[in-house]
Amino acid sequence: MNHESTSFNPKTWVSPEPLDTGSEAPAGQAETGKGGKTVWLGVGLALLIVLGALYLFWPTGTDAGEAVSAAIPDVPAESTEPAPPATATRIIQVQGMNELGASLQTMNVPLGDAYVIAEEAVAALGADAPMLVKVELGDTQTEPFVQSLVAELDNGTAVRLVRNAEGNYDRENLLETATTKVRSVEGTIEHNTFYVSAVAAGMPDSLVSEFTKIFSFDYNFQTEVGIGADFSATWEEQVTESGRIVGIPKLLTVTLETPSKSRTYYSFVPPDERETQWFNAQGTGNVRSLMQTPVDGARITSKFGYRTHPISKVQKKHRGVDFAAPTGTPIYASGDATVTFRAMAGGAGNLVKLDHGEGMETKYMHLNQFAAGLTVGQPVRQGDIIGYVGTTGGSTGPHLHYEIWIDGVDTDPLTFETSEQKSLSGDALAMFRAHRDNLVSAGEAMAAR
Ligand SMILES: [Zn+2]
């Protein structure tokens, strides 16, 4: 009889008794044992009955379990007085078949069994990555064997091996059930960059770039969004029963407020569309026909218009805007377009020209590299990467020189606006309103917690 192993829930990594001791959860202990250290969690069934408690020991001398050891007396690993437990639970962190096999051997599992089990577990996981392993040992007094073993990778992929009546192992692939949780964040820009402020407020760093991109039609992040601007966002993420976040979080609502304006957008997939788009409360899209700033995190170093050359004192028109950014920073197509030029072109350096139709053209100069596979005649979507910032041609440092031409006239990208924002209507608008109200109440429910 061994109610320890039969009550074990592999999804939680925690058997009920250790949790009830009031100590840290064993999963947490195992995490602190990273870097080759091993946490041994020995559960003595006999002692459980006699003392009503478990005992722990750490043969490798790790300090990972200090919080627990204060409450529970240490018992030497080799102690045979009182009688050692007939079963034991061990939690270890290992990587690869050989490490797992060797660890099982240190639990006195026979060499042959240890490596067969290790091979089976690693093959089932399909990756030689670090894993958390929980082992239930049987008959630890005379001939220790693995009663069951659960091995889990960081991404949640897990396998359970259970010894059957024939002494072989039945295999079961496990995946933790993940549920969708809505989270929210509110903050004020207090640091030099929006990125630092957003992450400090609790926004997952993987969402910051998308957040800024959503507002790239309304705000220039360098000139308009500074210290004191307020931002908020809600997003959903997949959380497993053991509290791990898996997959990629997804933004639901975003708000950005500066002294001069405030914008809120809601994610929505319009009927007959496949990709998420962003709409304000009235159902008007965030996208204008061309982006003001087709590059992330850039600093404007030279504006559009006439300027006097610092040395020659000659007035010359600057036909675009210069955005300084590190070499290699991605440059986006500022609108849906066809590539009309992609080559080295004298002082312009590596140059891309895009034709957006209706007389609109954009030019991107001094690129370090073109996007892989970019060819003349190719259609691109707004936001596609077309190349990378560089300093080729007549340029003194890495920057993007960006021009907008309307009907053959050079136009200031920073003041250029079109009213071609997409607005929802009819059924799509009704669907959007219901969806928007759901998002708002989900965010409010989250904030109320
Ligand atoms: Zn320039």
Image (tube, rainbow, N blue to C red):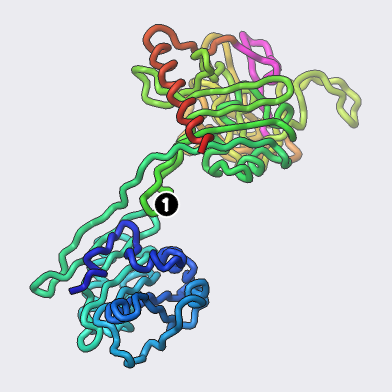
Q: Is residue 222 above or below residue 56?
A: above
SS type, badge 1? loop
Determine the image quadrant of residue 201: top right
Mark 1 Cα shell of 10 Å, populated few (<14), some (14-19), many (≥20): few
Q: On screen, 151 above or below 139?
A: above
Q: Nearer the viewer, residue 305 or 162?
A: 162
Q: On the rendered structure, is 156 left or right of 367? A: left
- Queried whether the magenta region covers residue 403, the answer comes back as yes
Q: Position of residue 278 (x, y in %)?
A: 49, 23
Q: In the rendered view, tell whether residue 262 sits above or below residue 119.
A: above
Q: Which residue is mark 1?
A: 243
Q: Position of residue 252 (x, y in %)?
A: 48, 30
Q: Identify the amino acid type marked 1.
A: Gly
Query: What residue do we see at 24% from left, 82% from top?
Result: 86
- Is residue 249 covered in magenta? no
Does residue 304 appear in this view?
yes
Residue 166, quarter of picture? bottom left
Q: Which residues are magenta?
A: 400-418
